[in-house]
Image (spheres, rainbow, N blue to C red):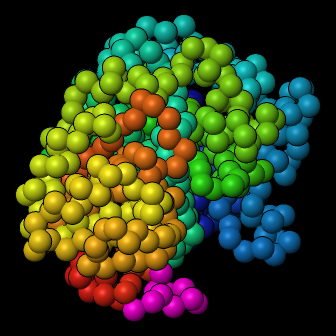
Amino acid sequence: MKEAKIIGMTLAKAASDETVYQKEYDLIILDEASMAYVPQVAFAAALSKHIIVCGDFKQLPPIASARDSLVKLWLKEDIFHRAGVAQSVEEGELHPHLFLLKEQRRMHPEISAFTNRVVYNNFVGDHESVLTSRDSIRSAEPFANQAAALVDTSFSGEYCMTERTSHSRMNPWQLLLSFQLIHESYVGGARSIGYVAPYRAQANLMEKLLDDLYSQERQTADIIAATVHRFQGSERDVMIFDTVDSYPQNRAGMLLTGRESERLINVAITRTKGKFVHVCDTSFVNKHVYRSKTLRQLVDHQIQNGQMVARKDIGKWVKFQHPRLQWMHARKLDNLLADIDSSKQEIIVAVPDFKNLSEEWKLILMKRDPEVKLTIISGNRNPEIFTDYFICMPVSFSFIIIDGHVVWLGLPVESNNRVQPPFVAARLDSPIIAEEILSQFKKMNNLKERPNFRVFLFFYSINIP
């Protein structure tokens, strides 16, 4: 029997290693080919008598940023699309050069039910092992004995904002809910947890929150927050998919509705072994996303299969309050009053409608220590409340920041937009997130319309460098 010589290397190394060119190979196996550029595949094929190309063309394509037509033709499409394989499958036929692996062995069937049917057109089924092998993950918190859940954030407020430098989107309310899901998973025993968002700004914000609140836990667990591209080719026991998009945006982002959105959402789901949690504003999706889009189909599928967790159920599924993140009824103000009483330097309050603030809140703000500065951010004034600094700037959601580290979301309730009972507030002790929220107002100095003098006083008062 002829002795076999097997070499394994990346395409990048193969292109630069002279030893690769010294002989012709009998067979080259190219894996993860959906993210390989077509010229790279051609290069690999030129080195061998035979080539086997392995990959999933329903996952993310190669990355190329240039807009030239040749780049689009040769660098933005994978080999499966260029060779016509993907088109055959879309038409309900199997290409003669395609060998299809018809069973998936990663996801619990409750998770794969959507992708098997919608993304893979019923060509893929489940191996019998996944029903039992993922049961221990499925049975753990959060949502014990559920492998898939949809945490609905409808009518919690208008928290989706655009990062002023990158124009990427972020959503602080869904960020905190997602962190709570990570915490529930970790306390429930999970040590392999992924948080995925379509927007880099949101993923980066979660990374900062994890570094601040979960640095010790991450030493003993694999907990990663990233955009979808980083997760391709990997897997996690628990995956939390935060779609971010919500009001006051007037349309869903192209990442969730554009040409490649099916592949992005497919990767977010199929990285999961035993528990997939989708954090989403379903009211926004139902209004702004067509039924033909994968995101809308995912929401509809989860609702029809009884996987939705309503806003009112937060008191049931939050079982493990983190010492630095607490959830409570927004009408119970004892903890907020304690924070205001103990404040030493400053209280910053952002409200969409400061003019119509209730009498209760007027009293709360006016009873603070006279040495504590009060800054208001709003689109209108209230002459009945004296403020040290006022920023005339429209905001879509209410928040309170005390002494640069305590962040309250969901208060004052009556000044928040698009909120329905039960009213929920979140208290976060994180100077990093407080700074990130305030930095969005600091960056307005870079806009063409210069702010008024009071804004500069405001930035000086909170000591932002």
User: Position of 375 compared to 422: left or right?
Assistant: left
The residue sitting at 33% across, 24% down in the picture is 315
User: Position of 114 compared to 83: left or right?
Assistant: left
- State the image coordinates of residue 172 (x, y, percent, origin top left): 41, 52
The residue sitting at 32% across, 52% down in the picture is 359
Q: Tell me where the magenta segment starts and ends, as one range.
A: 444-453
Residue 445 included in the magenta stretch of the image: yes
User: Position of 353 compared to 93: left or right?
Assistant: left
Q: In this view of the protein, which residue sits in the foreground, 144 or 111?
A: 144
The residue sitting at 24% across, 56% down in the picture is 363
- State the image coordinates of residue 434 (x, y, percent, origin top left): 29, 63
User: Position of 66 compared to 133: left or right?
Assistant: right
Q: In this view of the protein, which residue sits in the foreground, 225 or 362?
A: 362
Q: Quadrant of residue 292?
A: top right
Q: Is there any visible trace of residue 212 in the rendered image?
A: no
- State the image coordinates of residue 414 (x, y, percent, origin top left): 43, 47
Q: In this view of the protein, which residue sits in the foreground, 10 or 290?
A: 290
The residue sitting at 41% across, 22% down in the picture is 313
- State the image coordinates of residue 66 (x, y, percent, origin top left): 72, 74
Q: Quadrant of residue 111?
A: top right
